[in-house]
Amino acid sequence: MLLAPMTSQDVQTVDIALYQFRLGWPQLWLGTLGALSLLRPAPHRPARLFWLLVTITCLFLMDPITTWLWDNLALLPFLQFSYRLLAVTALSLAFLAGAVID
């Protein structure tokens, strides 16, 4: 669902409850290249690993499979909506994409 293509209904939607939040393919590809940069030795390797773990954690928490976790963990309902983690995911993917040119 996070990588589904945008539909014409999404473009015309004015009600935020009906809008589908997604990541783009360029962010995914650049983040993947940044994750692959962990394979080469570099001084910033721990930072890259941190951002990769943040990305994987956020993607996991936004998956519908984790509904049970959202229902049972007392801290998560304060976030209200799982798609709010898209901002954190975009930030972590940006750092991973930056690792490609480093």
Image (cartoon, helix red, strand yellow):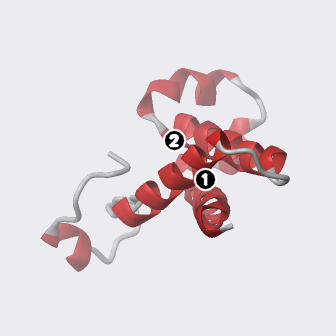
Query: What residue sits 63% from the left and 58% below the top?
Result: 96
| Residue situated in front as seen by the camera: 12 or 93 | 93
Query: What residue sits 48% from the left and 60% below the top?
Result: 30
Q: Quadrant of the C terminus?
A: bottom right
Up-down: is 60 above or below 25? above
Residue 78 vs residue 35: left or right?
A: right
Residue that extends furthest to the left in the rendered view of this protein: 8
Badge 2 or badge 1: first in the primary sequence? 2
Up-down: is 80 above or below 61? below
**Identity, as a three-letter code, of the amino acid under mark 2:** Met
Residue 41 vs residue 22: left or right?
A: right
Residue 81 percent location from the top left of the image = 56, 50
Residue 50 percent location from the top left of the image = 77, 44
Query: What residue sits 58% from the left and 46% below the top?
Result: 35
Disc count in the image?
Answer: 2
Q: CA distance from mark 2 to mark 1?
A: 7 Å
For label 2, count other residues whose C-alpha is less than 10 Å away and answer few (under 14), some (14-19) or many (20+): many
Residue at disc 2, secondary structure:
helix
Residue bearing mark 1: 85
Up-down: is 64 above or below 98? above
| Residue situated in front as seen by the camera: 65 or 24 | 24
Q: Quadrant of the N terminus?
A: top left
| Residue situated in front as seen by the camera: 4 or 70 | 4
**Identity, as a three-letter code, of the amino acid under mark 1:** Leu
Query: What residue sits 24% from the left and 69% below the top?
Result: 10
Residue bearing mark 2: 62
For label 1, count other residues whose C-alpha is less than 10 Å away and answer few (under 14), some (14-19) or many (20+): some
Residue at disc 1, secondary structure:
helix
Residue 16 percent location from the top left of the image = 40, 68
Whether label 2 touches label 1, CB < 8 Å: yes
Residue 70 percent location from the top left of the image = 61, 30
Label placed on residue 16: none
